[in-house]
Image (cartoon, rainbow, N blue to C red):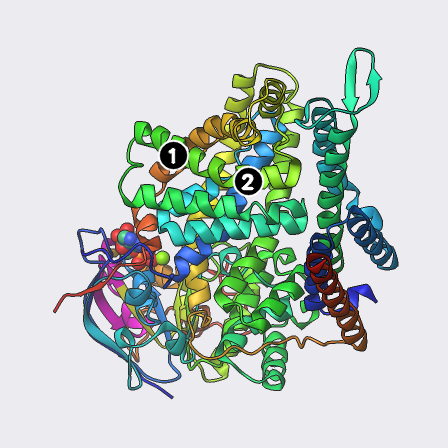
């Protein structure tokens, strides 16, 4: 079966219905990290999973809607970070399409790439919004040390974000990969937007 | 009203090795009540979905032969057009809720909004179908706050509002408690009286025998027989297909009581009673089953 | 009255409340908009509902004030000292600017968020031309989040009653959570198949132009409100140009 472009906007209903479920999983991850007081966010597992299942466009929509909904229900500042979530969804979608998330090692490496993408997008926003901080205890401790040591602002802020993003995105991709493996194949095939009907006669 | 015709229908799911439907042909007349029986994985749900275009348009996979609803060929039409003629209700009431509407009333409106109906017509149709299914009193509730039986009736109402000529029910009561099941069966009987063609998959053979004009027996993707309930349930090889006849039929079989006129065993309580000469007022000794 | 305003008017307000101060370029302008938002929220009787959001951002803002107050790169003028820790005026003013911006965003969005039903908002977007398919996705997310919260609360309660949340090492606690969370996650994914089919058979894929059960109404207040907002925006652009010409 020939695969069409991963950038098709012609999304089938199954991959659209996947988006609410994925945003729900993001939310479960976030609540879970909160309930166990983990130093991670775990709020992009669903976005990464949706991107792996249905491609970068669905990943991007999933990320955007995720933050719009958080903006409406938890914290309006989330609206602005929608850009980061879109980046995460697109990056995960491309990596999966290129077949990079097929093993646990691949998942870890992909986690690093996604963390880098998230940091590059988030850092300017952090600088604009909060003077460079992220609000994460460990990250901000590093930020304070960097600022006290007269590092430039962009570097201090970038490191603040990266030090949280690396463990967070690696863990998130690994969990998403685990869920992907556990799903029945005759379900995951429905999210592909490029299937054709064969004739039997 | 439209006839349903299947000609040499074959189907294989994607990633699957074997055919789920194998060379199936039949004709269903307008207004008939059709029962579909067969063991698990016989292909009942696949056949139902082939009559609304879910097979093959949603799943894709490999397809042969054709299904016609009137002059509309299923494999060549969009599900959004087919669903104006054929409606379907599934097993799990919870997963049929759209999940985007806040009240029962709005939930039923979902399909009508997609059809692009004017507002006044929508309201007429929603009121009618909610009353027909006896859930008008819940119209302002959140769909997820309904009981299983009420939710399933809402699913049926949502389909009825779209005014299809055919309604397919795929094990509509298998996840409901006895009371919820009774509610749904009563609703289905009402629909049948309205003259709609009904196709129902059901494991409760007493219900199949009572309502159906004809019954399809499926096994491993093949159509074994398509006959009146009396003829189907009088077969000697039913157990080979994982099907048990209704209790009345089994008892009469073991007692050798046949209907002299047809030459088949009786399939309903009424028929059994009249055969063994009990008047309406007396209790049938086998009723306890 | 605020609740009855068209969501569009509230979106215009968010836009103006955040663009105008940027154009004018004075902290007073930001502060004024915060004040206006507070007045509007009070009229709408929802001011108290902003508390959790403020608490959430307030904590970050506090650390920003401390860190910038001490370490900000342009720090020269001493403001005050707590023991051996010295706070500088420049850093604190920088933090104040950040705080005003964040609170302004919070308050202006709160008007939309706290006085509009999510379903109305999505419907407005769809009326404005958002694809109904994406509209569906947004409304169903709004439905799913409370369901998920409920499920998680049940799970956390179960954990707490078994003493899992407070006792035990992190690893044991994580292990205890997994068997409870995975069925929720798996079910939500597996049920997407049936839900997608259920939508399809109700004409979700239709190319026909959609109609709506609920009408959306614009009130007289909407026109007044929008007029004032546009006026403010034009004035602040005018102001910016004046400064630029000087
Ligand atoms: N989505 C699917 N992908 C692959 N195979 C399927 C799928 N759904 C059903 N099947 C297979 O098709 C056959 C018929 O299934 P089905 O129509 O659901 O049977 P029934 O409704 O009679 O229990 C079974 O062998 C089943 O495993
Ligand atoms: Mg079935």
* Residue A180 magenta: no
Tag 2 and tag 1 share a subunit: yes
Q: Residue furthest left?
A: A201
Instruction: Please tell me which of labels 2 and 1 falls first in the chain.
Output: 1
Q: Is residue B253 left or right of residue B141?
A: left
Chain to which mark 1 belongs: A
Q: Quadrant of the C terminus of chain A?
A: bottom left
Reading the image, the residue beneath label 2 is A124
Read off the residue under disc 1.
A113
- Compared across the picture, whether B70 is left or right of C36 comes to left
Of the pair C122 and B141, the residue shown nearer to us: C122
Residue that lies at the very extreme toward the front in this rendered image: C246
Secondary structure of residue under mark 2: helix
Specify the subunit that label 2 lies on. Answer: A
Look at 50% across and 22% down and name the residue there. Answer: C175
CA–CA distance between discs 2 and 1? 18 Å
**Magenta-tinted stretch:** B218-240
Q: Locate residue B18, reporting x and y percent.
A: 18, 54
| x, y percent for residue A163 | 51, 25
Toward the top, the furthest residue is C84
Front-lying residue, B3 or B117: B117
> From the Cβ of disc 2, is ligand 1 less than 8 Å away?
no
Foreground residue among C33 and A85:
C33
Position of residue A52 relative to residue A13, above or below, is above
């Amino acid at each position: 079966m020939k695969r069409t472009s991963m950038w098709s906007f012609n999304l089938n209903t199954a991959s659209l219905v996947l988006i609410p479920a994925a945003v729900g999983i993001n939310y479960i991850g976030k609540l879970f990290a909160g309930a166990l007081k983990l130093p991670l966010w775990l709020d992009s597992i669903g976005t990464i999973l949706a991107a792996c299942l249905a491609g970068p466009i669905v990943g991007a929509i999933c990320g955007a809607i995720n933050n719009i909904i958080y903006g409406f229900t938890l914290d309006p500042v989330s609206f602005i970070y929608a850009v980061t979530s879109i980046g995460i969804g697109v990056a995960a979608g491309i990596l999966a399409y290129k077949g990079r998330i097929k093993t646990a090692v691949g998942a870890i490496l992909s986690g690093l790439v996604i963390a880098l993408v998230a940091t590059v997008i988030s850092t300017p926003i952090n600088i604009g919004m909060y003077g460079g901080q992220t609000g994460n205890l460990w990250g901000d401790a590093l930020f304070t040390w960097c600022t006290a040591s007269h590092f430039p602002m962009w570097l201090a802020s970038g490191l603040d974000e990266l030090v949280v993003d690396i463990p967070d995105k690696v863990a998130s991709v690994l969990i998403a990969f685990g869920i992907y493996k556990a799903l029945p194949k005759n379900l995951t095939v429905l999210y592909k937007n490029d299937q054709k009907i064969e004739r039997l006669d | 009203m439209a006839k349903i015709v299947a000609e040499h229908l074959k189907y294989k799911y994607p990633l699957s090795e074997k055919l789920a439907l194998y060379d199936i042909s039949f004709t269903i007349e307008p207004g008939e009540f059709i029962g579909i029986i067969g063991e698990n994985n016989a292909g009942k749900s696949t056949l139902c979905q082939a009559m609304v275009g879910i097979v093959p348009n949603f799943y894709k996979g490999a397809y042969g032969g054709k299904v016609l609803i009137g002059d509309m060929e299923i494999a060549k039409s969009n599900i959004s057009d087919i669903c104006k003629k054929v409606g379907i209700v599934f097993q799990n009431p919870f997963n049929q809720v759209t999940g985007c509407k806040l009240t029962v009333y709005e939930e039923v409106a979902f399909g009508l909004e997609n059809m692009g109906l004017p507002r006044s017509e929508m309201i007429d149709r929603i009121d009618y179908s909610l009353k027909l299914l006896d859930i008008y009193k819940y119209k302002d509730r959140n769909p997820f706050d309904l009981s299983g039986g009420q939710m399933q009736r809402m699913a049926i109402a949502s389909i009825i509002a779209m005014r299809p000529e055919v309604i397919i029910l795929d094990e509509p009561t298998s996840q409901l408690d006895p009371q919820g099941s009774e509610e749904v069966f009563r609703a289905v009987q009402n629909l049948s009286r309205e003259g709609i063609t009904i196709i129902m998959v059901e494991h409760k053979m007493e219900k199949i025998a009572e309502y159906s004009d004809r019954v399809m027996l499926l096994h491993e993707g093949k159509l074994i027989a398509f006959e009146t309930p009396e003829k189907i349930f009088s077969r000697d090889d039913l157990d080979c297909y994982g099907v048990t006849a209704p209790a009345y039929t089994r008892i009469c079989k073991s007692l050798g009581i046949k209907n002299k006129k047809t030459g088949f065993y009786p399939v309903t309580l009424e028929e059994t009673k009249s055969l063994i000469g009990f008047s309406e007022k007396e209790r049938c000794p086998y009723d306890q089953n | 009255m605020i609740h009855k305003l068209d969501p569009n008017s509230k979106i215009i307000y968010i836009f103006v409340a955040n663009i105008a101060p940027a154009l004018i370029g004075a902290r007073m302008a930001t502060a004024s908009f915060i004040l206006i938002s507070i007045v509007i929220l009070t009229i709408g009787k929802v001011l108290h509902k902003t508390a959790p959001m403020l608490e959430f951002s307030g904590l970050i803002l506090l650390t920003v004030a401390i860190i910038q107050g001490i370490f900000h790169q342009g720090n020269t003028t001493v403001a005050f000292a707590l023991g051996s820790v010295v706070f500088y005026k420049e850093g604190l003013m920088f933090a104040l600017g950040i705080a005003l911006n964040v609170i302004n965003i919070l308050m202006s969005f709160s008007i939309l968020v706290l006085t509009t039903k999510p379903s109305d908002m999505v419907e407005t977007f769809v009326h404005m031309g958002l694809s109904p398919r994406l509209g569906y996705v947004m409304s169903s997310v709004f439905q799913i989040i409370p369901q998920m919260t409920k499920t998680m609360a049940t799970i956390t309660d179960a954990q707490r009653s078994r003493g899992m949340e407070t006792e035990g090492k992190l690893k044991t606690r994580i292990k205890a959570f997994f068997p409870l969370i995975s069925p929720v996650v798996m079910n939500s994914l597996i049920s997407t198949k049936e839900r997608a089919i259920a939508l399809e058979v109700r004409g979700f894929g239709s190319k026909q132009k959609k109609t709506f059960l609920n009408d959306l109404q614009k009130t007289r207040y909407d026109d007044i409100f929008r007029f004032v907002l546009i006026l403010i925006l034009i004035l602040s652009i005018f102001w910016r140009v004046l400064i630029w010409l000087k």
